[in-house]
Image: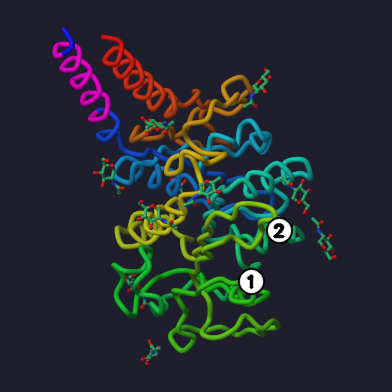
Amino acid sequence: MKTLTLLLSTATILSLMTDILAQPNVARVLIYSATRDFRHDSIPTAVDALVAHGPTANITFDHTEDETWFTDDRLQQYDGIVFLSNTGEVLNEAEKAAFQRWLDLGGNLIGIHSASDCLRNTTFFQHELGAAFDYHPELQNATVDVIGPSHPSTSMLPKEWAVRDEMYNFKSDPRSVGAVVILSANESSYTDPGPRKFDQGTPHPTAWFQEHGAGVDSNGTAGRSFYTSLGHLNETWQDDLFMAHVMGGITWALQSNTTLAFNSSGKVGNGTTANASSSSASTTASGTGTGSVSSTSPTAGGSSAAPPPLLSARALSAIGGFVLAISLWTLL
Ligand SMILES: *[C@@H]1O[C@H](CO)[C@@H](O)[C@H](O)[C@H]1NC(C)=O
Ligand SMILES: *[C@@H]1O[C@H](CO)[C@@H](O)[C@H](O)[C@H]1NC(C)=O
Ligand SMILES: *[C@@H]1O[C@H](CO)[C@@H](O)[C@H](O)[C@H]1NC(C)=O
Ligand SMILES: *[C@@H]1O[C@H](CO)[C@@H](O)[C@H](O)[C@H]1NC(C)=O
Ligand SMILES: *[C@@H]1O[C@H](CO)[C@@H](O)[C@H](O)[C@H]1NC(C)=O
Ligand SMILES: *[C@@H]1O[C@H](CO)[C@@H](O)[C@H](O)[C@H]1NC(C)=O
Ligand SMILES: *[C@@H]1O[C@H](CO)[C@@H](O)[C@H](O)[C@H]1NC(C)=O
Ligand SMILES: *[C@@H]1O[C@H](CO)[C@@H](O)[C@H](O)[C@H]1NC(C)=O
Ligand SMILES: *[C@@H]1O[C@H](CO)[C@@H](O)[C@H](O)[C@H]1NC(C)=O
Ligand SMILES: *[C@@H]1O[C@H](CO)[C@@H](O)[C@H](O)[C@H]1NC(C)=O
């Protein structure tokens, strides 16, 4: 009898453990592309491209332009937030506060293109992103130099990368808040009539990362931050090399391990019970789910997010099975 129970228990434990081990860590990431000033017409193309790349990166993307999603409850389920080509005041004071609390709990930020041109007077956001946009010369061909080749967002790029994009100038040097610059615009490869009024440091910053996002309070858990100023054109978002750059940056940011997808002590991220599904989503569905091709509208798009399956439920059932098996074994 004891032997039989032991065998059964072992089988149960093994099957539960296999189940857990086979389960990839699926991180949940919100793409936020609201704009209040200039609007890039590449936003729908960008959202589609990101959503399409989700499954291979083990990422579930949701997309919204609804600023009311920035509440504690709703943000709680996300491991990362992508600010995509935003402009202007895209969050009010209460929403900014919820966003900052989420950052303090270990959330990871990814900023793309004009994300550096939103929330222009919000210090924590500027620090978390790294620097604020100043101006750009006209769209043209240029080369950017890979100066940090070991980063997952640059390791696949040629040393001198030919791009057609806007070469941004910034109001400060992202290195001043601790960022590491990994892509640098070659200023001799394009025309910029200037004037450059601010010191953005040298070499010219184009993409960078922060191991610990500088917008987090000293009492908080700092996640990672990644920013690239590239991404203006539709064509860019259809370019495999650019997508590898962006997805490398997103994946790297999530590997901070400060959120639930990779850290069972995390306070935000996939695995939490979110009250998100109860909040009203006034926007139409667009690009949610691992892999579903999104039907994006160029204006507001949002997926009414279903509550995420519980990562912890899976772990709990395994632990429960283990405890049950052990107690049976010792009893008999
Ligand atoms: C996604 O998860 C699978 C299963 O755990 C793993 O083999 C694969 O390496 C993961 N992919 C990435 C990009 O993390
Ligand atoms: C949360 O993670 C679990 C397991 O890692 C995965 O099965 C699930 O699809 C994820 N949920 C979302 C919404 O990404
Ligand atoms: C970019 O793509 C969007 C649709 O995804 C389209 O509406 C827009 O006109 C395109 N822009 C250009 C310049 O072709
Ligand atoms: C979810 O909502 C309920 C009430 O509707 C509240 O008591 C609870 O604290 C909320 N949970 C989280 C995680 O915010
Ligand atoms: C930001 O600050 C500048 C300079 O103080 C001010 O002119 C501008 O109105 C502010 N913008 C917002 C949106 O608060
Ligand atoms: C700019 O680069 C594109 C490829 O990205 C190329 O097709 C085009 O001919 C180039 N234009 C100029 C003026 O060099
Ligand atoms: C910068 O661009 C100029 C002009 O295209 C080129 O001659 C030079 O080799 C480039 N330098 C670097 C470091 O890429
Ligand atoms: C962290 O400090 C900020 C002020 O910088 C405060 O508002 C917040 O409540 C503190 N958070 C915790 C968890 O103590
Ligand atoms: C996060 O966890 C992965 C897998 O265990 C590990 O390779 C990586 O170094 C960790 N990253 C950090 C920042 O701790
Ligand atoms: C896991 O999360 C906890 C709680 O936020 C944090 O204190 C810890 O540093 C995290 N672990 C890693 C490897 O980041």
How dense is the environment of label 1, judged by Cα within 10 Å: few (below 14), some, or many (20 and up)?
A: some
Vertical relation: 144 (above or below) 261: below
Residue 293: within the magenta?
no
How far across and down, in percent of the image, does residue 256 sit?
47, 54
Tally the numbered discs: 2
Q: Nearer the viewer, residue 147 or 118?
A: 147
Q: Nearer the viewer, residue 295 or 306?
A: 306
Give the left or right position of residue 35, taking residue 243 as reference: right
Q: Which residue is mark 1?
A: 177
* Quadrant of the rendering where the N terminus is positioned: top left
Residue 8: within the magenta?
yes
The disc at residue 124 is: 2
Q: How is the image coloured?
A: rainbow
Give the left or right position of residue 67, taking residue 331 as reference: right
- Determine the residue positioned at 31% across, 40% down: 55
- Please give the range of residues in magenta: 3-18
Vertical relation: 197 (above or below) 296: below
